[in-house]
Image: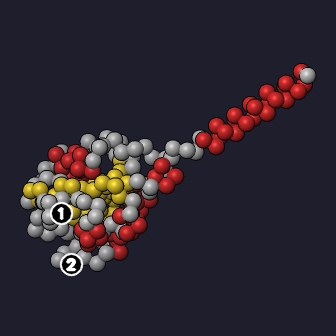
């Protein structure tokens, strides 16, 4: 009788241990990523941190053509795939994982400065950053090429900008204020 009870206890213990081991992998949303959730409620909130802490010496517009904001970041509807593709250079597979987006552009020439923030669902920010970098480097720009790109991951979100080096250096200084930001890409174009 005592041996049978010990066997049952051992079996229950092993079953509980196995169940805990299987559940340990749960809760890792973002396609298996272990990154923490984005500490910002919206992409605009995230991009505002960079914008509000920078010294911008050019006219800018945020959002998209239908709902623009002067001299500040604006929300970009995730249904606006034209802006995501043509101006933000976001590959389609990344677009499918964007749950919130914000933009801010140089008003006269987007190659001088384009900034964006994305909050992702179902893809890690590191994977999205790699794909954005590849899209940027493969793009053929008109009206003067941007000089540089930087991409920061912020949990399940990311902030990136491309343009003239002086403007991107300003992003780097301002991005130090982003909670949990990690610089993952800094590349020159060409």
> Residue 117 is drawn in which quadrant?
bottom left
**Left or right of 60 in this view: 88:** right
Q: Earlier in the sequence, mark 1 or mark 2?
A: 1
Examine the rendered structure and indicate whether residue 56 appears above or below residue 92: above
As drawn, which residue projects farthest toward the front? 1
Examine the rendered structure and indicate whether residue 168 appears above or below residue 179: below
**Left or right of 116 in this view: 65:** left
Q: Which residue is mark 2?
A: 142
Q: x, y percentage for residue 92?
A: 37, 69
Between 3 and 101, the one lying in front of the other is 3
Whole-angstrom CA distance, mark 1 to mark 2, is 20 Å
Is there any visible trace of residue 25 in the rendered image? yes
Q: Quadrant of the C terminus?
A: bottom left
Q: Quadrant of the N terminus?
A: top right
Q: Judging from the image, what secondary structure is the residue with disc 1 in?
A: loop
Between 17 and 108, the one lying in front of the other is 17
Q: x, y percentage for residue 153?
A: 37, 51
Q: Judging from the image, what secondary structure is the residue with disc 2 in?
A: loop
Residue at image position (44%, 55%) is 122
Q: How many marks?
A: 2
Q: Could you classify mark 1 by the number of other residues whose Cα lies within 10 Å: few (under 14), some (14-19), or many (20 or more)? A: many
> Residue 67 is drawn in which quadrant?
bottom left
Q: x, y percentage for residue 39?
A: 34, 41
Q: Which residue is mark 1?
A: 64
Between 166 and 133, the one lying in front of the other is 133
Tag 1 near tag 2, CB within 8 Å: no
């Amino acid at each position: 009788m005592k041996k049978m009870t010990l066997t049952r206890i051992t079996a229950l213990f092993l079953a509980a241990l196995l169940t805990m081991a299987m559940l340990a992998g749960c809760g890792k949303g973002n396609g298996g990523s272990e990154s923490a959730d984005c500490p910002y409620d919206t992409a605009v909130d995230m991009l505002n941190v960079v914008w509000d802490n920078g010294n911008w010496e050019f006219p800018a517009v945020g959002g998209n053509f239908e709902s623009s904001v002067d001299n500040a970041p604006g929300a970009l509807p995730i249904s606006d795939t034209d802006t995501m593709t043509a101006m933000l250079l976001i590959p389609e597979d990344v677009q499918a994982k964007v749950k919130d987006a914000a933009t801010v552009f140089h008003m006269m020439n987007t190659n001088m400065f384009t900034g964006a923030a994305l909050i992702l669902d179902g893809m890690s920010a590191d994977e999205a950053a790699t794909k954005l970098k590849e899209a940027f480097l493969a793009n053929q720009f008109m009206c003067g090429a941007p000089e540089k790109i930087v991409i920061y991951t912020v949990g399940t979100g990311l902030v990136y900008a491309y343009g003239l080096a002086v403007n991107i250096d300003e992003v780097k200084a301002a991005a130090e204020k982003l909670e949990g930001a990690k610089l993952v890409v800094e590349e020159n174009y060409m």
